[in-house]
């Protein structure tokens, strides 16, 4: 048995868990900086911004480190990472590394020679940033991802207001996912009930209609809403025609259009889990409750609802978790104020190549996923307990 | 970064395997794919093969310098000639990934438009981000300047705007009355970038953001926006092929950027690649691409070989280029990440 499962376990380890963990590791990994500036960091030990520019020993270490980095071809990466922390340092690092590798700074004292060639090293704040970047692990990205950063003395301080966006994005992501889950739940109950109660041929047709959209590309299902909701689209035209409005509404690129598109895309998941549970609930239960005199609402609330609750919960878990990770849909049909965490992850991965921050945001998303999984699991445990006792 | 390493070296291995079956004397050129590659093949490479008998193999990429870096560091270089954007040429040149081009190859640098020649590269194409409007939506007199684009009283309707800092803050500065040639000077002054963001604040409620050209053109076609910023060839394409009634407002001011041909250091066909670039620097040969695709050339005289009625579509034609200025590579190399992050934060607020 264990042998039969082994290929699957190996497969998951190698193609799924491994790369994911490796990427998440980037959120604390500092080896590209620490590994290339080892001597510099050692020489900077004990140096403080208040004591002015570092001394000759630090400059010698820096030149030796940069020359090595250049020879290993790591100077470009190093320059990029330093530039993330200190804008404008990129060319300074690359050019100094080139000169160092070419042996331009062969005879000490180097400090004055380097400063004469590359005046940028005379900036104490650059050294402060470099000093702060020492160590094999860094909390820089994780702090950034929750709108915090290290202040001048190394203390943790809130990020400036115009940069503090991630906590907002986090709350927004959870809220949007929650609303989408709620809307899906509300819409799918009558739909699932209709599918289950209809006579077999109709039931099958309706079921197929729910399944069909799943075979269509997510992109197509998303983009079609741009056409439907745009200024001269069918919805606006219909509203104008009936005289309900006299100016076309801005429907697309709003939170509204985002909800519409996400609900449409995720609804089948909820319907499927509800239908599978509802099919197992005999119709006679409701009939029995009604015949005993319960009003329909009471019968539904006290008999039907508890029985289909597991379907609700698993459907909600699927919809909620899927919704958390959405980024193509918000990018295409949402406005800038509707972007979710994943779209920031995509942005930092692709646009600014700040993989550390992308990884830190991924860690956040993963923690929310775990938390919501635990929540749904305990909810299931709670609702199934009375029945086990009975 | 190490993940990238693994994936790129794997990709490099595949490329090695793929190119091993091809003739090894062929020059491998790496372009942007799609219609861009098609225009290059028909307009330039096929002619070179015809004239010299040298074979050219085409590959495509997304401009990521990391891929060149991986090849150079692993020593298994399969690309001879690549076409990165100018900022990437600047970085790659400083890192020693590209071969410096002598004047025998490029010809006299003074004969190129500003920004279209570099120590390590010559322009493969020169594209511009321009102001375009839908003449069906704006009847009568259209916008004449970026200030008009910002003026929602005079021209009611939403504006399409690229959802990134690069190319957008330049437009904001032009709208604030800065001529293109002085935009970077102003941006580099203390508070210059804040000035651009203050302008963006004013237009923000009227903006529909776009990330792909297709999306932007769809919004322009549907009337969702009445004007938009856009890459010039994309607008020309819709005007010529789809008979749309769009106008490009060149005189509003625009910025042009370049992709550049650069020779990968240590490539197996370095000599042949340099020969190809020498041939390419002849104005007539350079014009081959621009005749088919509405992006301009590096060499000024190349314009002489482009039909008069097509020239009006190119950013580098003398009538237009006087309204434009080149994107400042150095500015963006240093500020790109920081500004994009600030822009993203600003957008969400």
Image (spheres, coloured by chain):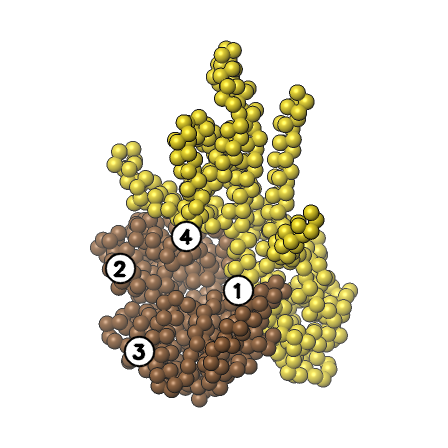
Q: Residues within 10 Å of mark 3 (few under 14, many from 20)?
A: many
Tag 3 or tag 1, which sits nearer the N-term?
3
Chain coloured yellow: A
Q: Residues within 10 Å of mark 4 (few under 14, many from 20)?
A: many
Using the image, tell me which numbered label, if any, was put on residue B242: 2
Are labels 4 and 1 assigned to the same chain? Answer: yes
Q: Element under label 1?
A: helix
Tag 4 or tag 3, which sits nearer the N-term?
4
In the rendered image, residue B172, in percent from the top left (x then y), is placed at 41, 59
Q: Whole-Å distance between the Cαs marked 3 and 4? A: 34 Å
Are labels 4 and 2 assigned to the same chain? Answer: yes
Residue denoted by label 1:
B335
Residue denoted by label 4:
B209
- Do the numbered discs 3 and 4 sit on residues whose CB atoms are within 8 Å? no
Chain coloured brown: B
Question: Looking at the image, which residue sits at the far right?
Answer: A46
Which is more foreground, mark 3 or mark 2? Answer: 2
Tag 1 or tag 4, which sits nearer the N-term?
4
Residue denoted by label 3:
B303
Residue A323 vertical placement versus B342 (above, below)? above
Question: Looking at the image, which residue sits at the far left?
Answer: B140
Q: Residues within 10 Å of mark 1 (few under 14, many from 20)?
A: some
In the rendered image, residue A59, in percent from the top left (x then y), is placed at 71, 74
């Amino acid at each position: 048995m264990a042998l039969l499962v082994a290929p699957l376990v190996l497969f998951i380890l190698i193609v799924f868990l491994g790369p994911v963990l490796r990427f998440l590791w980037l959120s604390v990994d500092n080896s590209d900086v620490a590994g290339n500036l080892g001597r510099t960091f050692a020489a900077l030990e004990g140096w403080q911004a208040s004591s002015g520019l570092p001394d000759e020993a630090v400059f010698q270490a820096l030149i030796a480190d940069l020359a090595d980095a250049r020879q290993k071809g790591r100077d470009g990466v190093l320059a990029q990472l330093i530039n993330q922390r200190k804008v404008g340092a990129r060319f300074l690092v690359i050019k100094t590394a080139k000169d160092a590798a070419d042996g331009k700074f062969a005879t000490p004292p180097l400090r004055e020679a380097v400063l004469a060639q590359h005046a940028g090293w005379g900036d104490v704040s650059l050294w402060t940033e470099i000093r702060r970047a020492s160590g094999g692990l860094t909390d820089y990205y994780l702090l950034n991802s929750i709108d915090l950063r290290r202040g001048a003395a190394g203390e943790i301080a809130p990020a400036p207001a115009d940069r503090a966006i991630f906590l907002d994005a986090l709350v927004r992501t959870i809220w949007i996912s929650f609303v989408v889950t709620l809307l899906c739940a509300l819409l799918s109950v009558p739909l699932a009930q209709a599918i289950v109660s209809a006579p077999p041929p109709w039931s099958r047709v309706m079921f197929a209609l729910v399944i069909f959209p799943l075979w269509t590309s997510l992109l197509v299902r998303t983009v079609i809403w741009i056409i439907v909701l745009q200024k001269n689209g069918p919805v606006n035209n219909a509203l104008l025609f009936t005289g309900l409005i006299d100016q076309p509404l801005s429907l697309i690129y709003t939170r509204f259009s985002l909800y519409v598109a996400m609900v449409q895309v995720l609804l089948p998941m909820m319907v499927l889990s509800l239908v599978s549970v509802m099919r197992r609930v005999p119709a006679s239960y409701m009939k029995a409750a009604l015949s005993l005199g319960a009003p329909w609402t009471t019968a539904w609330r006290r008999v039907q609802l508890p029985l289909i609750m597991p379907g609700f919960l698993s459907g909600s878990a699927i919809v909620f978790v899927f919704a958390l990770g959405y980024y193509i849909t918000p990018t295409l049909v949402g406005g800038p104020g509707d972007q979710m965490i994943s779209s920031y992850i995509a942005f930092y991965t692709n646009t600014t190549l700040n993989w550390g921050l992308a990884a830190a945001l991924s860690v956040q998303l993963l923690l929310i996923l775990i938390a919501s999984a635990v929540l749904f699991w305990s909810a299931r445990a709670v609702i199934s307990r009375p029945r086990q006792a009975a | 970064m190490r993940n990238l390493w693994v994936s790129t070296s794997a990709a490099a291995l595949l490329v090695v395997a793929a190119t091993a079956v091809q003739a090894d004397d062929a020059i491998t050129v790496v372009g942007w794919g799609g219609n861009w590659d098609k225009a290059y093949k028909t307009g330039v490479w096929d002619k070179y093969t015809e004239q010299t008998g040298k074979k050219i193999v085409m590959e495509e990429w997304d401009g990521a310098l990391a891929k060149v870096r991986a090849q150079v560091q692993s020593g298994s270089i399969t690309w001879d000639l690549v076409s990165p954007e100018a900022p990437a040429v600047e970085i790659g040149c400083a890192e020693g990934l590209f071969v410096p081009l002598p004047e025998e190859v490029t010809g006299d640098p003074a004969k190129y438009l500003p920004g279209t020649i570099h120590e390590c590269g010559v322009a493969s194409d020169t594209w511009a981000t321009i102001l375009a409007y839908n003449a069906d939506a704006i009847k009568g007199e259209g916008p004449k300047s970026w200030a008009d684009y910002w003026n929602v009283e005079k021209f009611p309707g939403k504006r399409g705007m690229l959802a990134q800092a690069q190319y957008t803050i330049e437009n904001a500065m032009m709208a604030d009355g800065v001529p293109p040639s002085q935009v970077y000077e102003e941006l580099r002054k203390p508070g210059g970038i804040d000035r651009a963001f203050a302008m963006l604040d004013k237009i923000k409620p009227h903006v529909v953001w776009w990330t792909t050209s297709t999306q932007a053109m769809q919004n322009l076609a549907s009337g969702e926006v009445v004007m938009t910023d856009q890459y010039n060839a994309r607008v020309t394409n819709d005007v010529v092929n789809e008979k749309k009634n769009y106008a490009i407002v060149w005189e509003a001011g625009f910025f042009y950027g370049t992709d550049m041909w650069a020779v990968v250091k240590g490539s197996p066909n370095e000599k042949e690649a340099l020969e190809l670039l020498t041939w390419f620097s002849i104005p007539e040969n350079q014009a081959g691409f621009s005749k088919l695709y509405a992006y301009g050339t590096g060499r000024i005289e190349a314009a002489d070989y482009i039909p008069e009625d097509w020239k009006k579509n190119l950013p580098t034609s003398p009538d237009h280029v006087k309204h434009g200025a080149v994107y400042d590579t150095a500015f963006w190399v240093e500020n790109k990440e920081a500004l994009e992050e600030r822009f993203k934060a600003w957008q969400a607020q």
